[in-house]
Image: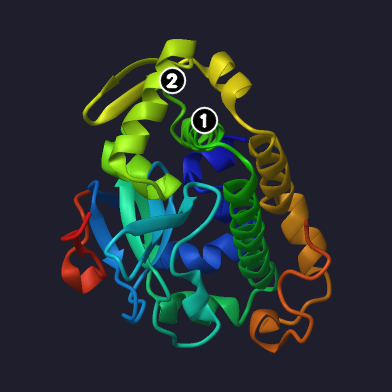
Amino acid sequence: MERRSSIGNRLLAALPPADFDLLAPHLRKVSLERDVVLVRSGDLVEQIFFPCTALIAFVMDMPNGQAVATTMIGNEGAAGILSTLRSIRSPMTAVVRVAGTTWQISPARFHAALAHSHALASAVQLHMRSLLVQFQHIAACNALHSVEARLARWLLQVHDQIGDDTLPLTQETLSELLGVRRTTVTHVVHKLRASGAIRSNRRSSIEVDRPRLESAACECYEIMRGRIDRIVSAEGIRSSGHGAPPHGPRRSHAGPWTNGDKVHAPTRGAGAERSRSH
């Protein structure tokens, strides 16, 4: 537990010390400001980020100009890690939605360590499995549950990440997470406030009542949290990595999700820029 808190990122903290030491000399801790774009859709990934207190949204820009967040990455995962499989352009835009700290490393440095670490190869696979679980479950949740229940789920997820009852979320971010217009967000926030799940809301933050918020959320919250907790753990990395070759993520024929659960902002050179559209 002490090691996990000192590292700050659960995926990195779950690595055996010897495997983490392959990355440690090349990791740089930076502070990310809210609304900074780490990589735009179609751009090459220049940095991999392992958030500690920052929250990074994967955003898809729709033809009508609306932006929709497909998931939010915090201290349980990483952004840009798919670049370790091969040199690819980012399929989505990664935007900082809650300011905070993150570990940063270049894909080349990460890939060099990956070639010598079974556990690191497993961590990449498990992170991809975790993302797939989130994508699948969010898609199902969006189809089946009310906007109010989905907003409660998102707020609980953010609360888990930052550990504070006051969540630094703007109306724009909530609209992006829910895939609805801001007028709908205003209506749903009003309903949650009337039920006591939200004690107050200002332009750039929301104060929540955790027990009442849990009552308002759909069952997807508990299911997703349980699955991700099982995936992103030291035990998960050890069991997944047993006997795997160092280049497992690139050579695997079964795929990474088989047997899985149904400082200041970096400069542009470090892969970040201020959001122009959010």
- Residue 173 in percent (x, y) is at 32, 44
Q: Tell me whether circle 2 and circle 1 mark residues in contact (CB < 8 Å).
A: no
Quadrant where the image shows the N terminus = top right
- Say which residue label 1 marks: 152
Q: Residue at x 49, y 12 (%)?
A: 195
Question: Tag 1: residue type?
Answer: Ala
Q: From this view, report whether residue 198 is shown above or below residue 149.
A: above
Residue 99 in sight here:
no
Quadrant where the image shows the C terminus = bottom left
Residue 238 in sight here:
yes
- Say which residue label 2 marks: 191
User: Which structural element holds mark 2?
Assistant: helix
Question: Tag 2: residue type?
Answer: Lys
State left or right for residue 27 relative to residue 3.
left
> Residue 275 lies in what quarter of the image?
bottom left
> Residue 49 lies in what quarter of the image?
bottom left
- Residue 148 in percent (x, y) is at 50, 31
State left or right for residue 211 relative to residue 36.
right
- Residue 144 in percent (x, y) is at 64, 45
User: Which structural element holds mark 1?
Assistant: helix
Q: Residue at x 63, y 68 (%)?
A: 120
In this view, the residue in front, 185 or 243, is 185
State left or right for residue 36 relative to residue 11.
left
Q: From this view, report whether residue 224 is shown above or below residue 252.
A: above
